[in-house]
Amino acid sequence: MALTELESARVRRTVGAFVEGRRPPQHLRQQVDLAYRVSGQSVEIFEVRRPCGGAPGERIELPVAKATYVRTPDVATLEEFVALVREDRNSCFFG
């Protein structure tokens, strides 16, 4: 089941602001960038970069983090997900 319009707007606001704050400076974004997508009930954050030795304009995506929203009372909030990725306590998202 896909997210509702309200949930999608919340994702764009919360995750979009987080990703925008982590993106590299404009002059580096042709080499490496950070993005996100919503697919069904999942939110994926990923790095976009030129592959080593790749053709001009070729891009690869490297996963950073993924969360899947489940409508139950025990599920953590979207803000808690972003806070966990931001903290990156064990360097498992951004190395």
Image (cartoon, rainbow, N blue to C red):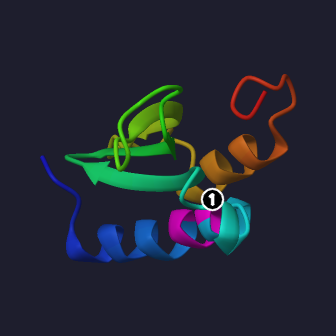
Q: Horizontally, is 94 left or right of 71 in the view?
A: right
Write down the quadrant of residue 61 in the picture: top left
What is the number of callouts on the image? 1
Judged from this view, the residue extending furthest toward the left is 1
- Residue 8, position as x, y percentages in the image: 31, 69
Q: Residue at x 35, y 50 (%)?
A: 57
Main secondary structure of the magenta stretch: helix
The vertical placement of 43 against 54, above or below, is: below
Q: Horizontally, is 67 left or right of 2 in the view?
A: right
Write down the quadrant of residue 23 in the picture: bottom right
Write down the quadrant of residue 78 in the picture: bottom right
The vertical placement of 18 against 5, above or below, is: above
Q: Residue at x 79, y 27 (%)?
A: 95
Q: Residue at x 61, y 46 (%)?
A: 81
Q: Secondary structure beneath disc 1? A: helix
The vertical placement of 6 against 70, above or below, is: below
Q: Is residue 29 magenta?
A: no
Q: Horizontally, is 51 left or right of 37 in the view?
A: right
* Span highlighted in magenta in the image: 15-19
Residue tagged 1 = 79
